[in-house]
Image: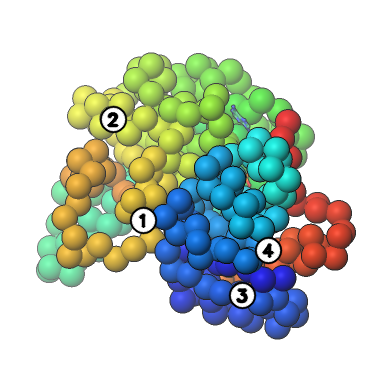
Amino acid sequence: MKIAFFSTKPYDRKFFDLANKEYGHEITYYEGKLRRETLKLAEGYDCACVFVNDQVDASVLIALAAQGTRLVALRCAGFNNVDIVSAKELGINVVRVPAYSPYAVAEHTVGLMLALNRKVYWAHSRVREGNFSLDGLLGFDMRGRTAGIIGTGKIGECVIRILNGFGCKVIAYDKFKNPACEELGVEYVELDELFAQSDIVSLHCPLFKETHHLINNDSIAKMKKGVMIINTSRGALIDSKAAIEGLKSEKIGYLGIDVYEEEGRIFFEDKTFEILTDDVFARLTTFPNVVITGHQAYFTQEAVAAIAKTTLENISAYENGDELVNAVKVD
Ligand code: NAD
């Protein structure tokens, strides 16, 4: 198949070129994102391959369909950036990579918890400057703390397994209980109870209309003073302005995010010499108790290799008329 690859980096090319030796697709890599202005680059291509911040809304899909594209292949799990209803109406199939390495994201999640708790980022810069003082670096034992996991799918379950190892008490909220988590001793509670009881709140549910700004002024008000909030799922699960207010009032004691609601304009690029115009993001970077990573939770060798393999497999399945096991379906 002829594939127009958007938002690609050298590391994507390395893993996809290697995996494509088995599949033999004709790939053209583009650095830029798919959006209205770059649509023409997909003209004559059967498939547009996109990532988390490509804009695949109705207008883009209409133009893609008119240009002959029949398949949108997401090389990620989340599909909140694709208008799947419009795609269906236009006869465009959408496939994704529902699972590649939940361990990668779960391990990064716990990495953020530990970095914040033990202030590893502060300690590292202090030691480099010859400052070996421990003032301000006091942490807490994870053992015995209550972690509230929102979304107990593949990643949530992995996070729970790690936190169980630490001796945390884990409670959870999900619309559907995961029996494996129940077997691990997790207690499912209502959201308000999770907010009230948790020392750490970690988000692992998808971004839907109903989960947009799940963490907002109201939910923050229900949390313990000094709570740690971790988001490695999707940026818009958190109302960033509410988080800033929570940090200013010290209701939020720690914030660790790998995703940000306006990340599409910032992440994955070197902006060292550019003026940051997003004041909300800029404010977040000023807090001593906030750690931000740029959507790298998935970024392990194993995960990127698995993403490449499944994406190309999905595309081959479409080409061969096989069942699209990883199709994104409209409910
Ligand atoms: P999954 O589908 O296995 O699990 C998601 C869980 O969320 C399910 O159990 C589902 O029932 C639950 N859920 C749905 N609606 C909910 C609601 N309103 N409230 C609470 N729970 C709800 O998905 P996963 O593989 O565990 O991934 C979770 C999310 O992680 C993805 O949606 C994606 O946005 C994000 N993600 C981020 C990265 C990264 O690099 N930062 C990488 C992969 C995935």
Q: Earlier in the sequence, mark 1 or mark 3?
A: 3
Q: Earlier in the sequence, mark 2 or mark 1?
A: 2
Does dot 4 land on a helix, a strand or a loop?
loop
Give the residue type at disc 4.
Asp
Question: Is 14 drawn above or below residue 221 in the view shown?
Answer: below
Q: Position of residue 54 (x, y in %)?
A: 48, 53
Give the residue type at disc 3.
Ile
Distance from Cα at disc 2 to Cα at disc 1: 19 Å
Q: Are marks 2 and 4 in contact (CB under 8 Å)?
A: no
- Observer-side mark, 2 or 4, equals 4
Distance from Cα at disc 3 to Cα at disc 4: 11 Å
Which residue is disc 1 drawn over?
267
Q: Residue at x 42, y 64 (%)?
A: 32
Distance from Cα at disc 1 to Cα at disc 4: 28 Å
Count of number-bearing discs: 4
- Front residue of 3/280: it is 3
Residue 322: tell me if it is visible: yes
- Observer-side mark, 3 or 2, equals 3
Residue 176 placement, left or right of 162: right
Instruction: Give the quadrant of ligand 1.
Output: top right
Which residue is disc 4 drawn over?
46
Question: Which quadrant would residue 79 be assigned to in this image?
Answer: top right
